[in-house]
Amino acid sequence: MIRRAFTLIEILICMAILAIVGSGAIYKGAGLLRDRRFSTSLQKITSEIFLTKSLAQNYQTDIHLILEQKKGKVYLSRHVDSANNFLKSLFKIKVVFPEIIFGSEGDIKEIHFYGNGWIEGEDKLNLSMASHCKKQYSVEIKHSFRKAL
């Protein structure tokens, strides 16, 4: 029995089919990657909010959490109104989330966590994916006390 090798045409056809199938998988994978980055950023923002609340109560100090939207990105920063430099350096952060938006350009949301458990500011944050606003997520800030206005 004589074995015949593949012709150049057969190899090119197989490569073209693999290229078409592969490009479809890459296209689907890019969307999944974008969705995963969005959900990871949401988890980070949520954990920062609850960490800030916990730190304010544990260290009995006032902490301000600021979400600012600039240039299509959300900047999260934490500030402490304490004379203690150790606490200032421990709690001060600035994080950028390019995948998330929550309003129009220049919007600022502030949440003040007080050492006695009181919270002043936003009750709920509605966050959206920056690439398309169809995906939305709400972060509820639950607390035991609410500062009277």
Image (spheres, helix red, strand yellow):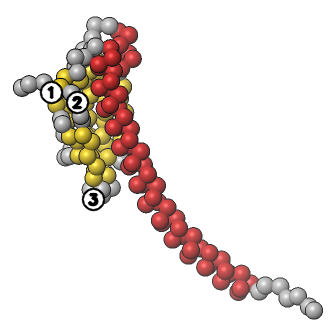
Q: Which residue is mark 2?
A: 143
Q: Residues within 10 Å of mark 3 (few under 14, many from 20)?
A: few
Return the x and y of residue 48 as percentages of the image width and height.
35, 32
Residue at point 23%, 34% (across, down): 142
Q: Which residue is mark 3?
A: 134
Q: Is residue 86 above or below residue 102?
A: above
Return the x and y of residue 8 as percentages of the image width and height.
74, 84
Return the x and y of residue 1 as percentages of the image width and height.
93, 92
Q: Is residue 55 above or below residue 100?
A: above
Q: Secondary structure at mark 1?
A: strand
Q: Is residue 60 above or below residue 126?
A: above
Q: Which residue is mark 1?
A: 146
Q: Earlier in the sequence, mark 1 or mark 3?
A: 3
Task: Describe residue 88's horizontal placement relative to residue 103 as left or right.
Answer: right
The three-letter amino acid code for the residue at tag 1 is Arg
Residue at point 47%, 65% (across, down): 28
Residue at point 36%, 48% (across, down): 99
The three-letter amino acid code for the residue at tag 2 is His
Farthest left residue? 149
Return the x and y of residue 124 as percentages of the image width and height.
20, 40
Q: Residues within 10 Å of mark 1 (few under 14, many from 20)?
A: few
Farthest front residue? 144
Where residue 116 is drawn, which disc sits there? none
Number of marks in the rendered image: 3
In terms of image quadrants, where is residue 131?
bottom left
Q: Residues within 10 Å of mark 2 (few under 14, many from 20)?
A: few
